[in-house]
Amino acid sequence: MKVFIFFWSAVLISLPGYTQTKYPPPIESDYVIKNFKFESDETLPELNLHYTVIGQPVKDKNGRIENAVLIMHGTTGSGKQFLSDQFAGHLFNPGQILDATRYYIILPDAIGHGKSSKPSNGWHMKFPKYTYNDMVVADYRLLTEHLGVNHLRLVMGTSMGGMHTWIWGYTYPDFMDALMPLASLPVEIAGRNRMLRKMAINLIEMDPEWKGGEYSAEPKVGLTGAISSLIFMVSSPLQWQKKAPTRMKADSMLAAMESRYSGSLDANDMIYQLDASRDYNPSPDLYKIKAPLFAVNSADDQVNPPELKIMEKEIRKVKQGRYILLPITDKTSGHGTHSNPEIWGSYLKKLLELTNKKQP
């Protein structure tokens, strides 16, 4: 099948509330693939992939891109989240680990997220039932067909993006120099993790106002219940106790979180986002990963609790794999530690040094 590709001119993004950065200005753009076929055999006439890039690609004498870095976001997020002071401010500035004057940084919005195609664009529950594999394939096509990236210096991601990193490793094993999945496990989503996702989905679908996905206003009761599951899922007992040591402060903090989530989430989008992991299971394919891989988790991560002892077993299947478990400290924040390079940046630096065939 011949694939027709369309794209629009890039525009500079505006980020109110962010401090002045020293790295090159982020540039947003879109790429549209005609008749994108999903694993479900469903086809979307036009799949829009939104993305942000920082810096410029550099090619070696053979025409291979040697400085491209792909960073993938978590469930319900978008690539824009990595432009925060906490993340970009510790990685992208001149002299920092992923200095954007030297690296070409690519931040895609995954299918179903951000400004990429998603159910709330008008498709509702008729949107194709995408999977993590579909999301990775779409990003690969964005890089290769549109951005002209034929090699990645580094693939990394947080939470869902971490899970996508494992998939990248065995799906395109010769495409990257290094891999760094953050806050993830390379096994089937099961146990408490799957139950919480299914609870959230069920709460939305049980709300009469959901109307089979054809609501005109968000199903408030169901969506609030789903948000409660999400909040519990990513909770940090130590940090939350410090931030909310009294009943009044706890109630106020909860109300603020519920309000923030409610203002940015769509019920149908959330159903798809949570269920996209249903077929995820890298375990049988981990032996295919060739590039050095550092898997980084935090000991206070309620989504990927270390007491399950899963990573210790699975990392042995990765030829050049290493597992780093960050201890609980005053700086860790549960699952959200994945977005704080001040804590794990030294390991990223070591990984880049280890795979330093020729630094850009």
Image: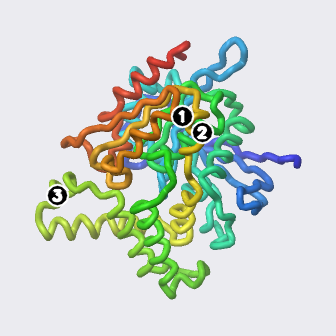
Q: Is residue 14 in sight in this rendering?
A: no
Q: CA distance from mark 3 to mark 1?
A: 34 Å
Rendering quarter of residue 340: top left
The disc placed on residue 155 is 1
Few, some or many residues within 10 Å of mark 3 (<14, 14–19, 20+): few
Among numbered discs 3 and 1, the one appearing first in the sequence: 1
* Residue ID at (37%, 68%): 229
Which residue was labeled with disc 3?
241
Secondary structure of the residue carrying numbered label 1: strand
Q: Position of residue 82 (x, y in %)?
A: 45, 42
User: Which quarter shows the C terminus?
Assistant: top right
Q: Nearer the viewer, mark 2 or mark 3?
A: 2
Please, which residue is most extreme toward the bottom here?
208
Which residue was labeled with disc 2?
168
Q: Is residue 198 in sight in this rendering?
A: yes
Q: Amino acid at mark 2?
A: Trp
Residues at discs 1 and 2 in contact (Cβ within 8 Å): yes
Q: Amino acid at mark 1?
A: Val
* Residue ID at (51%, 32%): 318
Among numbered discs 1 and 2, the one appearing first in the sequence: 1
Please, which residue is most extreme toward the right here?
1
Above/below status of 84 relative to 67? below
Q: Amino acid at mark 3?
A: Gln
Q: Position of residue 39 (x, y in %)?
A: 71, 56
Few, some or many residues within 10 Å of mark 1 (<14, 14–19, 20+): many
Q: Position of residue 3 (x, y in %)?
A: 83, 47
